[in-house]
Image: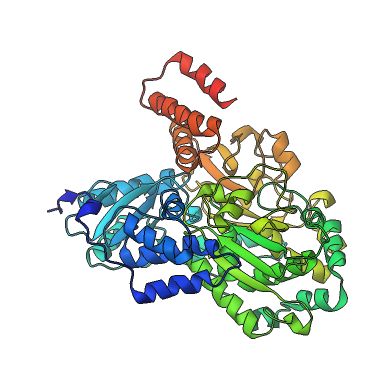
Protein backbone atom coordinates (compact mmCIF):
# COMPACT_ATOMS: atom_id res chain seq x y z
CA UNK A 1 0.00 0.00 0.00
CA UNK A 2 1.48 3.32 -1.06
CA UNK A 3 1.24 6.60 0.81
CA UNK A 4 -1.22 9.08 -0.71
CA UNK A 5 0.38 11.82 -2.71
CA UNK A 6 0.06 15.43 -1.68
CA UNK A 7 1.55 18.70 -2.75
CA UNK A 8 3.78 20.59 -0.33
CA UNK A 9 1.52 22.71 1.92
CA UNK A 10 0.96 26.27 0.68
CA UNK A 11 3.09 28.92 2.25
CA UNK A 12 0.11 30.53 4.00
CA UNK A 13 -0.52 27.42 6.13
CA UNK A 14 3.05 27.12 7.38
CA UNK A 15 3.93 28.93 10.59
CA UNK A 16 7.27 30.68 10.14
CA UNK A 17 8.81 32.29 13.17
CA UNK A 18 11.52 34.92 13.24
CA UNK A 19 15.07 33.72 12.97
CA UNK A 20 16.70 32.52 16.16
CA UNK A 21 19.36 34.54 17.93
CA UNK A 22 22.01 32.00 16.94
CA UNK A 23 21.04 32.20 13.26
CA UNK A 24 21.07 35.99 13.34
CA UNK A 25 24.50 35.88 14.97
CA UNK A 26 25.78 33.49 12.28
CA UNK A 27 24.51 35.86 9.58
CA UNK A 28 26.25 38.81 11.20
CA UNK A 29 29.46 36.78 11.43
CA UNK A 30 29.14 35.95 7.73
CA UNK A 31 28.69 39.64 6.95
CA UNK A 32 31.90 40.51 8.82
CA UNK A 33 34.01 38.18 6.65
CA UNK A 34 33.93 40.15 3.43
CA UNK A 35 35.16 43.55 2.19
CA UNK A 36 31.57 44.45 1.29
CA UNK A 37 28.64 43.26 3.44
CA UNK A 38 26.45 42.50 0.42
CA UNK A 39 28.72 39.56 -0.49
CA UNK A 40 27.26 37.84 2.59
CA UNK A 41 23.68 38.10 1.26
CA UNK A 42 23.60 34.73 -0.50
CA UNK A 43 25.29 32.81 2.37
CA UNK A 44 22.90 34.57 4.78
CA UNK A 45 19.84 33.46 2.81
CA UNK A 46 21.14 29.91 2.86
CA UNK A 47 21.64 30.06 6.64
CA UNK A 48 18.10 31.35 7.06
CA UNK A 49 16.69 28.63 4.81
CA UNK A 50 18.60 25.99 6.73
CA UNK A 51 16.80 27.07 9.90
CA UNK A 52 13.36 27.99 8.57
CA UNK A 53 13.12 25.33 5.85
CA UNK A 54 12.27 27.82 3.12
CA UNK A 55 12.34 31.57 2.48
CA UNK A 56 8.99 33.37 2.83
CA UNK A 57 8.97 37.18 2.46
CA UNK A 58 9.17 37.81 6.23
CA UNK A 59 12.36 35.78 6.57
CA UNK A 60 13.86 37.36 3.44
CA UNK A 61 13.14 40.81 4.85
CA UNK A 62 14.80 39.87 8.13
CA UNK A 63 17.92 38.70 6.32
CA UNK A 64 17.94 41.89 4.24
CA UNK A 65 17.87 44.00 7.39
CA UNK A 66 20.81 42.10 8.90
CA UNK A 67 22.92 42.48 5.75
CA UNK A 68 21.92 46.08 5.12
CA UNK A 69 20.11 45.78 1.80
CA UNK A 70 16.49 46.31 0.78
CA UNK A 71 14.00 43.41 0.90
CA UNK A 72 13.63 43.60 -2.89
CA UNK A 73 17.39 43.19 -3.33
CA UNK A 74 17.30 40.07 -1.19
CA UNK A 75 14.15 38.80 -2.90
CA UNK A 76 15.74 38.97 -6.37
CA UNK A 77 18.32 36.41 -5.25
CA UNK A 78 15.70 34.23 -3.59
CA UNK A 79 13.73 33.90 -6.80
CA UNK A 80 16.77 33.30 -9.03
CA UNK A 81 18.83 30.47 -7.52
CA UNK A 82 17.44 26.94 -7.82
CA UNK A 83 18.73 25.93 -4.37
CA UNK A 84 16.74 28.67 -2.62
CA UNK A 85 13.10 27.78 -1.98
CA UNK A 86 10.18 30.15 -1.56
CA UNK A 87 7.77 27.28 -0.78
CA UNK A 88 8.09 24.55 1.88
CA UNK A 89 8.97 20.98 0.99
CA UNK A 90 9.31 17.67 2.79
CA UNK A 91 11.88 17.01 5.47
CA UNK A 92 13.94 15.21 2.84
CA UNK A 93 14.25 16.79 -0.60
CA UNK A 94 15.22 14.06 -3.07
CA UNK A 95 16.43 15.41 -6.41
CA UNK A 96 16.99 12.90 -9.22
CA UNK A 97 19.21 14.00 -12.11
CA UNK A 98 17.69 13.30 -15.52
CA UNK A 99 20.01 15.46 -17.63
CA UNK A 100 22.51 14.00 -20.10
CA UNK A 101 24.14 11.60 -19.47
CA UNK A 102 22.41 10.66 -16.18
CA UNK A 103 18.99 10.40 -17.82
CA UNK A 104 19.85 7.68 -20.33
CA UNK A 105 22.30 6.01 -17.93
CA UNK A 106 19.53 5.17 -15.48
CA UNK A 107 18.28 8.49 -14.12
CA UNK A 108 14.89 8.29 -15.84
CA UNK A 109 14.46 4.71 -14.61
CA UNK A 110 15.47 5.68 -11.05
CA UNK A 111 12.95 8.52 -11.01
CA UNK A 112 10.15 6.21 -12.18
CA UNK A 113 11.06 3.60 -9.55
CA UNK A 114 11.08 6.19 -6.76
CA UNK A 115 7.72 7.54 -7.89
CA UNK A 116 6.26 4.03 -7.81
CA UNK A 117 7.79 2.99 -4.48
CA UNK A 118 7.09 6.28 -2.69
CA UNK A 119 3.62 6.59 -4.17
CA UNK A 120 4.09 10.13 -5.44
CA UNK A 121 4.93 11.86 -8.69
CA UNK A 122 7.90 14.16 -8.96
CA UNK A 123 7.05 17.60 -7.62
CA UNK A 124 4.96 16.06 -4.85
CA UNK A 125 5.41 15.32 -1.15
CA UNK A 126 4.41 12.21 0.75
CA UNK A 127 1.41 12.53 3.08
CA UNK A 128 3.60 12.30 6.16
CA UNK A 129 5.66 15.28 4.92
CA UNK A 130 8.82 13.19 4.98
CA UNK A 131 9.90 13.22 1.33
CA UNK A 132 9.57 15.62 -1.58
CA UNK A 133 10.66 14.14 -4.90
CA UNK A 134 12.01 16.35 -7.67
CA UNK A 135 13.12 15.68 -11.22
CA UNK A 136 16.04 17.96 -12.04
CA UNK A 137 17.44 18.96 -15.40
CA UNK A 138 20.47 20.84 -14.07
CA UNK A 139 23.70 18.84 -13.77
CA UNK A 140 24.90 17.95 -10.26
CA UNK A 141 28.55 17.16 -10.99
CA UNK A 142 28.25 13.39 -10.59
CA UNK A 143 27.84 12.25 -14.20
CA UNK A 144 30.44 9.50 -13.77
CA UNK A 145 28.39 7.88 -10.99
CA UNK A 146 24.99 7.79 -12.67
CA UNK A 147 22.26 7.16 -11.83
CA UNK A 148 22.33 9.40 -8.81
CA UNK A 149 20.32 11.78 -6.69
CA UNK A 150 20.90 14.43 -4.08
CA UNK A 151 19.27 14.30 -0.66
CA UNK A 152 19.70 17.61 1.10
CA UNK A 153 23.38 18.50 0.90
CA UNK A 154 24.65 15.00 0.05
CA UNK A 155 24.99 12.73 -2.95
CA UNK A 156 23.63 9.22 -3.28
CA UNK A 157 25.40 7.79 -6.32
CA UNK A 158 25.61 4.57 -8.35
CA UNK A 159 21.97 3.63 -7.62
CA UNK A 160 22.09 1.00 -10.34
CA UNK A 161 20.22 -2.08 -9.14
CA UNK A 162 16.74 -2.78 -7.81
CA UNK A 163 18.36 -3.60 -4.47
CA UNK A 164 20.03 -0.17 -4.44
CA UNK A 165 16.66 1.50 -5.04
CA UNK A 166 14.99 -0.58 -2.32
CA UNK A 167 17.72 0.39 0.14
CA UNK A 168 17.29 4.05 -0.80
CA UNK A 169 13.52 3.95 -0.29
CA UNK A 170 13.82 2.04 2.99
CA UNK A 171 16.24 4.62 4.36
CA UNK A 172 14.02 7.51 3.26
CA UNK A 173 11.00 5.99 4.99
CA UNK A 174 13.04 5.82 8.19
CA UNK A 175 14.06 9.45 7.79
CA UNK A 176 17.66 8.49 7.03
CA UNK A 177 20.09 9.23 4.20
CA UNK A 178 21.54 6.02 2.77
CA UNK A 179 25.17 5.51 1.94
CA UNK A 180 26.20 5.44 -1.71
CA UNK A 181 25.84 1.91 -3.10
CA UNK A 182 28.58 0.15 -4.99
CA UNK A 183 32.36 0.52 -4.91
CA UNK A 184 33.01 4.25 -4.79
CA UNK A 185 36.69 4.12 -5.72
CA UNK A 186 36.14 2.04 -8.84
CA UNK A 187 33.58 4.45 -10.22
CA UNK A 188 35.33 7.61 -9.11
CA UNK A 189 38.91 6.78 -9.98
CA UNK A 190 39.03 4.04 -12.62
CA UNK A 191 42.30 5.32 -14.06
CA UNK A 192 44.39 3.06 -11.86
CA UNK A 193 42.55 -0.10 -12.86
CA UNK A 194 44.75 -2.53 -14.79
CA UNK A 195 43.45 -1.85 -18.32
CA UNK A 196 43.99 1.91 -17.98
CA UNK A 197 47.37 1.58 -16.29
CA UNK A 198 48.67 -0.73 -18.98
CA UNK A 199 47.55 1.67 -21.69
CA UNK A 200 49.85 4.52 -20.78
CA UNK A 201 53.16 5.11 -19.02
CA UNK A 202 52.21 8.70 -18.17
CA UNK A 203 52.32 9.43 -14.44
CA UNK A 204 49.58 11.88 -13.40
CA UNK A 205 50.69 15.23 -11.99
CA UNK A 206 47.43 16.90 -10.99
CA UNK A 207 45.76 13.72 -9.72
CA UNK A 208 48.79 11.67 -8.63
CA UNK A 209 47.04 9.70 -5.90
CA UNK A 210 44.23 7.98 -7.80
CA UNK A 211 42.37 5.91 -6.77
CA UNK A 212 41.47 8.05 -3.79
CA UNK A 213 38.36 9.79 -2.51
CA UNK A 214 39.72 11.04 0.82
CA UNK A 215 41.32 14.46 1.22
CA UNK A 216 45.12 14.76 1.21
CA UNK A 217 46.10 16.34 4.55
CA UNK A 218 48.73 19.05 4.82
CA UNK A 219 51.43 16.79 6.30
CA UNK A 220 51.13 14.29 3.45
CA UNK A 221 51.09 17.03 0.81
CA UNK A 222 54.21 18.67 2.23
CA UNK A 223 56.00 15.34 2.58
CA UNK A 224 55.59 14.91 -1.19
CA UNK A 225 57.10 18.35 -1.89
CA UNK A 226 53.98 20.44 -1.52
CA UNK A 227 54.34 24.20 -0.93
CA UNK A 228 57.97 24.11 -2.08
CA UNK A 229 56.92 25.99 -5.21
CA UNK A 230 55.24 28.68 -3.12
CA UNK A 231 58.37 29.08 -1.00
CA UNK A 232 60.47 29.27 -4.16
CA UNK A 233 58.24 31.96 -5.68
CA UNK A 234 58.24 34.06 -2.51
CA UNK A 235 61.95 33.75 -1.78
CA UNK A 236 63.56 33.72 -5.21
CA UNK A 237 61.17 35.31 -7.72
CA UNK A 238 59.55 38.69 -8.25
CA UNK A 239 55.83 38.77 -9.04
CA UNK A 240 56.48 39.70 -12.68
CA UNK A 241 58.89 36.78 -13.01
CA UNK A 242 56.17 34.36 -11.90
CA UNK A 243 53.77 35.83 -14.45
CA UNK A 244 56.39 35.63 -17.21
CA UNK A 245 57.15 32.00 -16.33
CA UNK A 246 53.48 31.01 -16.57
CA UNK A 247 53.21 32.90 -19.85
CA UNK A 248 56.30 31.13 -21.26
CA UNK A 249 54.85 27.73 -20.27
CA UNK A 250 51.90 28.21 -22.66
CA UNK A 251 49.43 27.21 -19.97
CA UNK A 252 46.01 27.77 -21.49
CA UNK A 253 42.90 28.17 -19.37
CA UNK A 254 41.25 24.82 -18.62
CA UNK A 255 37.77 26.17 -18.01
CA UNK A 256 36.78 26.19 -21.67
CA UNK A 257 38.06 29.40 -23.26
CA UNK A 258 41.69 28.16 -23.47
CA UNK A 259 43.11 31.67 -23.13
CA UNK A 260 46.73 32.09 -22.04
CA UNK A 261 46.80 32.16 -18.23
CA UNK A 262 50.03 34.15 -18.06
CA UNK A 263 48.75 36.70 -20.55
CA UNK A 264 45.57 37.12 -18.50
CA UNK A 265 47.63 37.78 -15.38
CA UNK A 266 49.69 40.32 -17.32
CA UNK A 267 46.58 42.40 -18.07
CA UNK A 268 46.28 43.38 -14.39
CA UNK A 269 47.38 47.03 -14.06
CA UNK A 270 50.60 47.60 -12.12
CA UNK A 271 49.06 50.23 -9.87
CA UNK A 272 48.66 50.46 -6.09
CA UNK A 273 45.44 49.30 -4.51
CA UNK A 274 43.53 46.08 -3.82
CA UNK A 275 43.42 43.34 -6.44
CA UNK A 276 41.65 39.99 -6.37
CA UNK A 277 42.03 36.45 -7.63
CA UNK A 278 38.76 34.57 -8.12
CA UNK A 279 38.96 30.85 -8.83
CA UNK A 280 35.95 29.57 -10.73
CA UNK A 281 34.80 26.21 -9.36
CA UNK A 282 31.24 26.55 -10.63
CA UNK A 283 31.50 23.61 -13.03
CA UNK A 284 27.81 23.30 -13.85
CA UNK A 285 28.25 22.02 -17.40
CA UNK A 286 26.69 18.55 -17.77
CA UNK A 287 29.46 15.98 -18.05
CA UNK A 288 31.97 17.97 -15.97
CA UNK A 289 33.28 16.82 -12.59
CA UNK A 290 37.07 17.30 -12.68
CA UNK A 291 37.20 20.30 -10.35
CA UNK A 292 35.15 18.41 -7.80
CA UNK A 293 37.79 15.70 -7.52
CA UNK A 294 40.65 18.21 -7.43
CA UNK A 295 39.02 20.09 -4.54
CA UNK A 296 37.90 17.04 -2.60
CA UNK A 297 41.26 15.26 -2.84
CA UNK A 298 44.05 17.69 -3.82
CA UNK A 299 42.83 20.67 -1.79
CA UNK A 300 46.31 21.90 -0.87
CA UNK A 301 47.53 21.79 -4.46
CA UNK A 302 44.76 24.25 -5.31
CA UNK A 303 45.59 26.46 -2.32
CA UNK A 304 49.27 26.51 -3.26
CA UNK A 305 48.38 27.46 -6.83
CA UNK A 306 46.06 30.21 -5.59
CA UNK A 307 48.78 31.59 -3.31
CA UNK A 308 51.35 31.71 -6.13
CA UNK A 309 48.88 33.31 -8.55
CA UNK A 310 47.86 35.86 -5.92
CA UNK A 311 51.49 36.76 -5.30
CA UNK A 312 52.06 37.19 -9.04
CA UNK A 313 49.20 39.65 -9.53
CA UNK A 314 49.53 41.50 -6.20
CA UNK A 315 46.39 40.05 -4.60
CA UNK A 316 45.98 39.82 -0.82
CA UNK A 317 42.39 38.58 -0.78
CA UNK A 318 41.34 35.68 -3.00
CA UNK A 319 38.03 33.90 -3.50
CA UNK A 320 37.19 30.30 -4.40
CA UNK A 321 33.64 30.18 -5.84
CA UNK A 322 32.13 26.68 -5.80
CA UNK A 323 28.83 25.61 -7.26
CA UNK A 324 26.25 25.26 -4.47
CA UNK A 325 25.93 21.49 -4.81
CA UNK A 326 29.60 20.97 -3.89
CA UNK A 327 28.98 21.11 -0.15
CA UNK A 328 31.52 18.42 0.73
CA UNK A 329 34.17 19.96 -1.50
CA UNK A 330 33.53 23.30 0.19
CA UNK A 331 33.92 21.80 3.65
CA UNK A 332 37.17 20.13 2.66
CA UNK A 333 38.52 23.33 1.13
CA UNK A 334 37.67 25.31 4.25
CA UNK A 335 39.44 22.71 6.38
CA UNK A 336 42.51 22.87 4.13
CA UNK A 337 42.55 26.67 4.26
CA UNK A 338 42.48 26.48 8.07
CA UNK A 339 45.34 23.94 8.01
CA UNK A 340 47.44 26.13 5.73
CA UNK A 341 46.75 29.23 7.78
CA UNK A 342 47.73 27.51 11.02
CA UNK A 343 51.00 26.46 9.39
CA UNK A 344 51.85 29.99 8.24
CA UNK A 345 51.15 29.20 4.57
CA UNK A 346 48.26 31.67 4.44
CA UNK A 347 47.35 34.76 6.42
CA UNK A 348 49.93 37.28 7.55
CA UNK A 349 53.56 36.93 6.40
CA UNK A 350 53.08 33.83 4.24
CA UNK A 351 56.10 31.53 4.64
CA UNK A 352 57.85 34.29 6.60
CA UNK A 353 57.70 36.73 3.68
CA UNK A 354 56.14 40.18 3.40
CA UNK A 355 53.23 38.71 1.43
CA UNK A 356 49.80 38.42 3.09
CA UNK A 357 46.91 36.38 1.73
CA UNK A 358 43.39 35.51 2.86
CA UNK A 359 41.31 32.97 0.94
CA UNK A 360 37.50 32.91 1.14
CA UNK A 361 35.59 29.74 0.21
CA UNK A 362 32.20 30.77 -1.20
CA UNK A 363 29.38 28.49 -2.35
CA UNK A 364 26.77 29.50 -4.91
CA UNK A 365 23.19 28.25 -4.89
CA UNK A 366 22.51 26.57 -8.21
CA UNK A 367 22.92 28.74 -11.30
CA UNK A 368 24.68 27.58 -14.48
CA UNK A 369 25.21 31.19 -15.56
CA UNK A 370 27.68 31.66 -12.69
CA UNK A 371 30.19 29.68 -14.75
CA UNK A 372 30.50 32.84 -16.86
CA UNK A 373 33.14 34.93 -15.13
CA UNK A 374 31.32 38.27 -14.94
CA UNK A 375 28.07 36.67 -13.75
CA UNK A 376 30.15 34.92 -11.10
CA UNK A 377 31.52 38.29 -9.99
CA UNK A 378 27.99 39.68 -9.77
CA UNK A 379 27.03 36.70 -7.61
CA UNK A 380 30.02 37.31 -5.33
CA UNK A 381 28.88 40.89 -4.93
CA UNK A 382 25.46 39.72 -3.74
CA UNK A 383 23.60 40.65 -6.90
CA UNK A 384 21.48 38.69 -9.36
CA UNK A 385 24.13 36.94 -11.51
CA UNK A 386 23.73 38.63 -14.88
CA UNK A 387 26.75 38.79 -17.23
CA UNK A 388 28.37 42.20 -17.51
CA UNK A 389 28.98 44.04 -20.74
CA UNK A 390 32.67 44.25 -21.64
CA UNK A 391 34.85 46.32 -21.72
CA UNK A 392 35.90 46.96 -19.05
CA UNK A 393 37.26 43.45 -18.56
CA UNK A 394 37.66 41.96 -15.07
CA UNK A 395 41.45 42.40 -15.18
CA UNK A 396 40.80 46.16 -15.07
CA UNK A 397 37.47 46.40 -13.23
CA UNK A 398 36.33 43.11 -11.72
CA UNK A 399 35.24 42.21 -8.19
CA UNK A 400 34.15 45.34 -6.31
CA UNK A 401 35.38 47.32 -9.32
CA UNK A 402 38.97 46.28 -8.60
CA UNK A 403 41.47 44.54 -10.93
CA UNK A 404 40.61 40.84 -10.85
CA UNK A 405 41.88 37.64 -12.43
CA UNK A 406 39.35 34.83 -12.85
CA UNK A 407 40.84 31.37 -13.45
CA UNK A 408 39.47 27.84 -13.43
CA UNK A 409 40.46 25.30 -10.73
CA UNK A 410 42.29 23.02 -13.15
CA UNK A 411 44.22 25.98 -14.54
CA UNK A 412 45.43 27.03 -11.09
CA UNK A 413 46.57 23.57 -9.93
CA UNK A 414 49.06 23.55 -12.82
CA UNK A 415 50.85 26.62 -11.45
CA UNK A 416 52.87 25.02 -8.59
CA UNK A 417 54.27 22.44 -11.01
CA UNK A 418 55.30 25.10 -13.53
CA UNK A 419 57.10 27.10 -10.81
CA UNK A 420 58.76 23.96 -9.49
CA UNK A 421 59.88 22.39 -12.79
CA UNK A 422 60.00 25.28 -15.26
CA UNK A 423 58.32 26.31 -18.50
CA UNK A 424 60.30 23.98 -20.77
CA UNK A 425 59.35 20.96 -18.69
CA UNK A 426 55.70 21.93 -18.97
CA UNK A 427 55.86 22.51 -22.74
CA UNK A 428 57.42 19.07 -23.19
CA UNK A 429 54.27 17.43 -21.80
CA UNK A 430 52.24 16.61 -24.88
CA UNK A 431 52.84 16.71 -28.62
CA UNK A 432 52.08 20.42 -29.10
CA UNK A 433 54.24 22.95 -27.17
CA UNK A 434 51.69 25.68 -27.98
CA UNK A 435 48.99 23.75 -26.11
CA UNK A 436 51.02 21.95 -23.50
CA UNK A 437 50.71 20.35 -20.12
CA UNK A 438 48.49 17.82 -18.39
CA UNK A 439 44.77 17.76 -19.12
CA UNK A 440 42.01 16.11 -17.11
CA UNK A 441 39.42 14.52 -19.38
CA UNK A 442 36.01 13.82 -17.81
CA UNK A 443 34.57 10.66 -19.33
CA UNK A 444 30.89 9.83 -18.77
CA UNK A 445 27.90 8.33 -20.52
CA UNK A 446 27.89 4.87 -22.07
CA UNK A 447 31.38 3.78 -21.02
CA UNK A 448 32.56 0.92 -18.79
CA UNK A 449 34.96 2.94 -16.69
CA UNK A 450 33.70 6.51 -16.34
CA UNK A 451 35.79 9.01 -14.40
CA UNK A 452 38.57 11.56 -14.62
CA UNK A 453 41.57 10.70 -16.80
CA UNK A 454 44.68 12.84 -16.70
CA UNK A 455 46.86 12.68 -19.82
CA UNK A 456 49.09 15.11 -21.74
CA UNK A 457 46.93 17.48 -23.75
CA UNK A 458 46.38 16.15 -27.26
CA UNK A 459 48.12 12.83 -26.66
CA UNK A 460 45.06 10.66 -27.30
CA UNK A 461 42.07 10.62 -29.63
CA UNK A 462 38.41 10.26 -28.72
CA UNK A 463 38.55 6.59 -29.65
CA UNK A 464 41.68 5.88 -27.64
CA UNK A 465 40.30 7.54 -24.51
CA UNK A 466 37.01 5.67 -24.76
CA UNK A 467 38.38 2.24 -25.71
CA UNK A 468 41.82 2.03 -24.07
CA UNK A 469 41.09 3.98 -20.91
CA UNK A 470 37.31 3.85 -20.57
CA UNK A 471 37.10 0.18 -21.56
CA UNK A 472 34.65 0.80 -24.42
CA UNK A 473 30.91 1.19 -24.15
CA UNK A 474 29.17 -0.25 -21.11
CA UNK A 475 26.21 -1.39 -23.19
CA UNK A 476 28.30 -3.04 -25.88
CA UNK A 477 26.52 -0.93 -28.47
CA UNK A 478 28.15 1.19 -31.12
CA UNK A 479 28.71 4.86 -30.49
CA UNK A 480 26.37 7.36 -32.12
CA UNK A 481 28.56 10.31 -31.19
CA UNK A 482 30.38 12.11 -28.38
CA UNK A 483 29.70 15.47 -26.80
CA UNK A 484 33.27 16.72 -26.20
CA UNK A 485 32.54 19.78 -24.02
CA UNK A 486 29.45 18.84 -22.12
CA UNK A 487 26.23 19.78 -23.90
CA UNK A 488 27.44 23.22 -25.03
CA UNK A 489 29.30 22.00 -28.11
CA UNK A 490 28.21 20.12 -31.26
CA UNK A 491 28.25 16.34 -31.19
CA UNK A 492 31.30 14.71 -32.78
CA UNK A 493 29.90 11.85 -34.91
CA UNK A 494 31.24 8.30 -34.78
CA UNK A 495 33.21 8.67 -38.03
CA UNK A 496 35.37 11.46 -36.52
CA UNK A 497 36.40 9.80 -33.27
CA UNK A 498 40.03 9.43 -34.41
CA UNK A 499 40.48 13.19 -33.92
CA UNK A 500 43.00 14.06 -31.22
CA UNK A 501 41.72 15.62 -28.02
CA UNK A 502 43.26 19.07 -28.36
CA UNK A 503 41.75 22.43 -29.21
CA UNK A 504 42.67 22.52 -32.90
CA UNK A 505 41.79 18.90 -33.73
CA UNK A 506 38.39 18.97 -32.09
CA UNK A 507 37.63 22.24 -33.85
CA UNK A 508 38.58 20.63 -37.17
CA UNK A 509 36.13 17.82 -36.34
CA UNK A 510 33.36 20.42 -36.15
CA UNK A 511 33.14 20.99 -32.41
CA UNK A 512 35.22 22.36 -29.52
CA UNK A 513 37.18 20.83 -26.65
CA UNK A 514 36.04 23.33 -24.01
CA UNK A 515 36.61 21.87 -20.57
CA UNK A 516 37.03 18.36 -22.07
CA UNK A 517 33.84 16.87 -20.62
CA UNK A 518 33.15 13.90 -22.85
CA UNK A 519 29.67 12.34 -22.89
CA UNK A 520 29.52 9.09 -24.89
CA UNK A 521 26.16 8.65 -26.64
CA UNK A 522 25.26 5.06 -27.63
CA UNK A 523 23.54 4.20 -30.89
CA UNK A 524 20.18 3.42 -29.28
CA UNK A 525 19.70 6.88 -27.73
CA UNK A 526 16.91 8.86 -29.42
CA UNK A 527 18.81 11.95 -30.55
CA UNK A 528 15.62 14.05 -30.70
CA UNK A 529 14.91 13.19 -27.08
CA UNK A 530 18.51 13.95 -26.17
CA UNK A 531 18.35 17.33 -27.92
CA UNK A 532 15.05 18.11 -26.21
CA UNK A 533 16.59 17.32 -22.81
CA UNK A 534 19.58 19.56 -23.58
CA UNK A 535 17.32 22.45 -24.61
CA UNK A 536 15.32 21.93 -21.43
CA UNK A 537 18.56 22.49 -19.51
CA UNK A 538 19.34 25.75 -21.29
CA UNK A 539 15.76 26.93 -20.95
CA UNK A 540 15.92 26.28 -17.20
CA UNK A 541 19.35 27.87 -16.77
CA UNK A 542 18.94 30.99 -18.90
CA UNK A 543 19.53 34.10 -16.80
CA UNK A 544 17.01 35.92 -19.01
CA UNK A 545 19.15 38.96 -19.72
CA UNK A 546 19.38 38.64 -23.52
CA UNK A 547 16.30 38.38 -25.73
CA UNK A 548 17.60 35.66 -28.13
CA UNK A 549 18.25 33.33 -25.20
CA UNK A 550 15.27 34.32 -23.05
CA UNK A 551 12.77 34.00 -25.91
CA UNK A 552 14.53 31.78 -28.45
CA UNK A 553 15.53 28.86 -26.25
CA UNK A 554 11.99 28.19 -24.98
CA UNK A 555 10.76 28.21 -28.58
CA UNK A 556 13.46 25.73 -29.59
CA UNK A 557 12.56 23.50 -26.66
CA UNK A 558 8.85 23.70 -27.48
CA UNK A 559 9.43 22.71 -31.12
CA UNK A 560 11.69 19.79 -30.20
CA UNK A 561 9.21 18.56 -27.59
CA UNK A 562 6.51 18.61 -30.25
CA UNK A 563 8.71 16.63 -32.64
CA UNK A 564 9.56 14.13 -29.89
CA UNK A 565 5.85 13.65 -29.26
CA UNK A 566 5.34 12.76 -32.93
CA UNK A 567 3.54 15.99 -33.74
CA UNK A 568 6.28 17.67 -35.73
CA UNK A 569 5.92 19.12 -39.21
CA UNK A 570 8.42 19.46 -42.04
CA UNK A 571 8.53 23.23 -41.60
CA UNK A 572 9.74 22.73 -38.00
CA UNK A 573 13.20 21.79 -39.25
CA UNK A 574 13.56 25.08 -41.10
CA UNK A 575 12.26 26.94 -38.05
CA UNK A 576 14.76 25.19 -35.79
CA UNK A 577 17.64 26.21 -38.04
CA UNK A 578 16.35 29.77 -38.28
CA UNK A 579 15.98 30.19 -34.52
CA UNK A 580 19.37 28.67 -33.70
CA UNK A 581 21.42 30.49 -36.35
Q: Which of 474 and 568 is in front in this view?
A: 568
Q: Would residue 295 be seen by someone viewing this image from the given angle?
A: yes
Residue with the most extreme left position: 1
Seen at 65% across and 45% down, the residue is: 514
How many numbered badges does the structure rendering display? 0
Q: Is residue 169 above or below residue 121?
A: below
Seen at 23% across and 51% down, the residue is: 10
Q: In this view, does 479 lie above or below 377?
A: above
Q: Would residue 190 be seen by someone viewing this image from the given angle?
A: no
Seen at 59% across and 69% down, the residue is: 360
Q: Is residue 353 above or below residue 522?
A: below
Q: Which of 18 and 202 is in front in this view?
A: 18
Q: Residue 213 appears at what percent x and percent y?
A: 53, 70
- 375 vs 509, left or right, is left
Q: Residue 271 appears at what percent x and percent y?
A: 82, 62
Q: Residue 398 appears at what percent x and percent y?
A: 68, 54
Quadrant of the frame with the C terminus? top right
- 468 vs 16, left or right, is right
Q: Which colour scheme is used?
A: rainbow
Q: Residue 308 appears at what percent x and percent y?
A: 75, 69
- 278 vs 523, left or right, is right
- 470 vs 24, left or right, is right
Seen at 51% across and 64% down, the residue is: 40
Amino acid sequence: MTAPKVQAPPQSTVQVRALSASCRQAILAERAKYPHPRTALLPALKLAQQEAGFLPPAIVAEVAELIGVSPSQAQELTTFYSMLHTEPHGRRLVQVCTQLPCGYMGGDRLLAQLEQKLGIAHGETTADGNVTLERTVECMGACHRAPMCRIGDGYVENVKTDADVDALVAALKKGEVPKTPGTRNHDCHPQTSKPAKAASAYEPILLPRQPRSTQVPLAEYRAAGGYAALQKALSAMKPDEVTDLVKQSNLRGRGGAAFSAGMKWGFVPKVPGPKHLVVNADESEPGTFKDRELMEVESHMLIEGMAIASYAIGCNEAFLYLRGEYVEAGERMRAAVAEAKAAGLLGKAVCGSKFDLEIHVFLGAGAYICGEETALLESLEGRRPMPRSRPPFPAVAGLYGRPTVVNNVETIVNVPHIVKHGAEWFKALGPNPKSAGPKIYCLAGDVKRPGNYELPLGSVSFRELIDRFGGGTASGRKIKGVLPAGISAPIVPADKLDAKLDYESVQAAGSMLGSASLIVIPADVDIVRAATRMLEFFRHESCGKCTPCREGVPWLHRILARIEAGQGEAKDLELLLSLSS
